[in-house]
Image (spheres, rainbow, N blue to C red):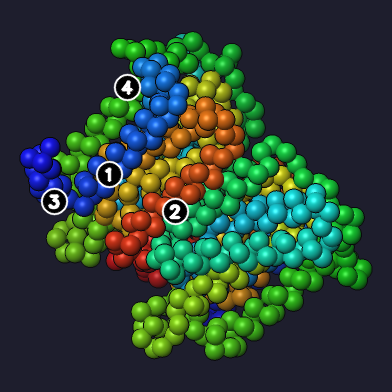
């Protein structure tokens, strides 16, 4: 029983409830369906990337080029739109660019045998740099009107397409990671890649696929974000890699691989999103919030480490 | 010529792997330098070289600090935030006590950086937290702290005392104080890494922590020392940055941590720890510096800089990954 209470996910859930209680007492505007629906836009795009990234980190790798991929995919869509590509074509371009960029990361790590942190530091510069090289200080905003519906549209009532996508994919990733043999394999690879290789798992193929998947979802985030903003600048999604990695680690995924759950990541995304939003309602500037998120990130890994020392 | 060649070959074979790499990279940097000079004769003028060095100086200092951290299997993502916080502290102190002179401000800046770096180090050493998570967290915290300190306001040149700004720009034998600091720092690192006991302990702790601890070296303590030195350098660089650009605000040096890590990687520092030389790191900084200053000359938009950095990192690591097997060690627990 105590083991269950002390579980990471339970603690995150408690934090989330406390957050709701705190913010609804501090601000009369917080507990309101429309407000809360608005708040989800704060994190759904980042959380969508956090899902595959969690798998990647559980498998013992890391990808910090995700925000660079978002920028590159957004620029690709912006250029496409400027040349008169329609809405479905634009979405395909965004997803395709993401997938391709993810495949580049995967190839560097598997064929190139470059450690993933180094490879993705390099590709982060490369992808973001390509966005800057193409756009300079220009802005692309000739998107067709129907393109706006991805990031601004609602399925029913206050439930946005973005939120729907996040819920659907969170469930899908949860089932995939926790209920299929491929999910088991990801844990095994993260816990001990060499033993996994000896057990007959195609370790590199898994790694490659996970990088490609992370790229694809970065492309998806690019479609949603670009559609929501209606414009592309090369600095789009600047700094998001840190938010996304923070979400995953806050969700209890071990940076040393082999540990973590999708429930934790989803809860962390909610905690993260509502903290940002709630503090915003209280007129606390974003930069001060970063003190909280930074401290939270360290506490999250420090507390279990401290306890296990005793 | 035929008599020289075998001699040279013997010399080459006698060198260590890392020295060979440094030589090859130095040659490459020179080739780049001459290629640019060939097209633009003014590039090799003493004035331009002095300017190039001045532009690269802070970068060189930071990269040397970062190298120590990577050497012991760490990484310091908070280095630029640390710089910015110390720089803001220096600027605010100077504004409050304009007559106190430069020395106390520099001392305060270094002390602040040392504390911030030491904080990273303590977390990595005593709690054995993964360096990437610790410094990701402190990066946000230090940046946020600047805002709390300055309330989001800028400190401009007209609020800084004359001496505060003039110190970095003072010329001595044709080079700025800033350049001399970088040269001095580089020389100190080259000598210290070659000859000191601490340096050998750092290399040992990074190369094989387990073996190091059997021979009486505490790898965690080495990480703490590396982070603290790196922090002290970031603190000094904070004052230098603010004084050189004569402005302090929350976002100064944003993203510089990755450029600094890039310079280390280009310079041959292995992310797996235990490998790297000060000469390589300085060359890495100069290489990036030469590219940066020649882009406007060849009429390539400076927006290409980031892309080129990324491409150079990837080429450098792909070339060295084939020789080493240092797969993903940075994500493994220190033992």
Task: Determine if marks 4 and 1 fall on one subunit.
Answer: yes
Of mark 4 and mark 1, the one earlier in the sequence is 1
Q: Which residue is mark 2?
A: B314
Q: Nearer the viewer, residue A80 or A188?
A: A80
Of mark 1 and mark 3, the one earlier in the sequence is 3
Q: Secondary structure at mark 2?
A: helix
Q: Residue at x 42, y 52 (%)?
A: B315
Q: Which residue is mark 1?
A: B24
- Chain under callout 1: B
Q: Residue at x 30, y 27 (%)?
A: B183
Task: Determine if marks 2 and 4 fall on one subunit.
Answer: yes
Location of the C terminus of chain A by quadrant is bottom left
User: In front: mark 4 or mark 1?
Assistant: 1
**Disc 1 from disc 2: Cα separation:** 17 Å
Q: Secondary structure at mark 4?
A: helix
Residue B13 bears which disc, if any?
Answer: 3
Looking at the picture, does residue A157 appear above or below residue A191?
above
Q: Secondary structure at mark 1?
A: helix
Tell me the crowding category of disc 3: few under 14, some 14 to 19, or many 20 or more residues within 10 angstroms, Cα based. Answer: few
**Disc 2 from disc 4: Cα separation:** 31 Å
């Amino acid at each position: 029983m105590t083991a269950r209470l002390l579980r990471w996910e339970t603690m995150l859930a408690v934090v989330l409830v406390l957050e709701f209680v705190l913010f609804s007492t501090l601000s009369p505007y917080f507990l309101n369906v429309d407000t809360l629906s608005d708040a989800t836009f704060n994190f759904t795009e980042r959380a969508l990337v956090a899902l595959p990234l969690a798998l990647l980190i559980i498998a013992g790798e890391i990808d910090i080029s995700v925000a660079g991929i978002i920028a590159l995919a957004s620029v690709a869509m912006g250029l496409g739109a400027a040349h008169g590509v329609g809405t479905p074509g634009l979405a395909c371009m965004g997803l395709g660019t993401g997938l391709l960029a993810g495949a580049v990361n995967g190839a560097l790590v598997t064929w190139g045998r470059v450690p993933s942190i180094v490879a993705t530091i390099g590709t982060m510069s490369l992808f973001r740099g390509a966005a800057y090289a193409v756009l300079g200080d220009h802005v692309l905003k000739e998107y067709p009107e129907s393109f706006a519906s991805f990031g601004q549209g609602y399925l029913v009532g206050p439930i946005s397409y973005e939120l729907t996508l996040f819920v659907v994919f969170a469930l899908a990733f949860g089932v995939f990671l926790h209920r299929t043999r491929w999910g088991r394999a990801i844990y095994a690879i993260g816990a001990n890649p060499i033993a996994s290789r000896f057990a007959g798992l195609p370790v590199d193929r898994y790694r490659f696929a996970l990088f490609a998947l992370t790229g694809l979802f970065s492309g998806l985030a690019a479609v949603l974000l670009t559609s929501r903003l209606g414009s592309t600048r090369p600095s789009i999604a600047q700094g998001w890699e840190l938010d996304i990695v923070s979400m995953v680690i806050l969700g209890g995924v071990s940076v040393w691989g082999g540990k973590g759950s999708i429930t934790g990541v989803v809860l962390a995304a909610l905690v993260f999103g509502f903290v940002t939003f709630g503090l915003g309602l209280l007129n606390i500037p974003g930069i001060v919030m970063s003190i909280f998120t930074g401290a939270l990130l360290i506490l999250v890994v420090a507390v279990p480490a401290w306890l296990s020392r005793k | 010529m035929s008599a020289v060649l075998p001699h040279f070959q013997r010399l080459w074979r006698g060198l260590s792997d890392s020295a060979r790499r440094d030589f090859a990279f130095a040659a490459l940097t020179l080739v780049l330098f001459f290629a640019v000079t060939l097209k633009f004769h003014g590039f090799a003028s003493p004035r331009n070289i002095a300017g190039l060095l001045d532009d690269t100086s802070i970068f060189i200092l930071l990269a040397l600090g970062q190298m120590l951290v990577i050497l012991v299997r760490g990484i310091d993502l908070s280095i630029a935030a640390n710089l910015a916080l110390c720089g803001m502290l220096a600027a605010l102190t100077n504004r409050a006590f304009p007559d106190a002179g430069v020395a106390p401000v520099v001392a305060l800046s270094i002390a602040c950086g040392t504390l911030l770096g030491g904080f990273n180090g303590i977390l990595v050493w005593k709690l054995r937290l993964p360096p990437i998570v610790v410094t990701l967290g402190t990066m946000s915290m230090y940046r946020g702290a600047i805002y709390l300190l300055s309330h989001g306001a800028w400190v401009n040149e007209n609020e800084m005392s004359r001496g505060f700004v003039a110190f970095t720009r003072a010329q001595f034998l044709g080079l700025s104080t800033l350049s001399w600091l970088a040269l001095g720092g580089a020389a100190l690192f080259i000598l210290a890494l070659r000859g000191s006991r601490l340096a050998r302990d750092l290399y040992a702790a990074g190369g094989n922590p387990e073996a190091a601890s059997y021979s009486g070296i505490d790898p965690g303590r080495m990480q703490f020392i590396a982070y603290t030195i790196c922090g002290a350098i970031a603190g000094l660089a904070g004052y230098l940055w603010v004084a050189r650009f004569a402005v302090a605000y929350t976002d100064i040096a944003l993203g510089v941590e990755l450029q600094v890590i890039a310079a280390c990687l280009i310079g041959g520092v292995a992310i797996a720890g235990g490998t790297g030389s000060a000469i390589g790191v300085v060359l890495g900084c100069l290489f990036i510096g030469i590219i940066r200053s020649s882009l406007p000359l060849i009429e390539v938009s400076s927006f290409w800089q980031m892309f080129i950095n990324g491409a150079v990192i990837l080429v450098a690591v792909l070339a060295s990954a084939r020789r080493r097997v240092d797969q993903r060690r940075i994500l493994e627990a220190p033992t």
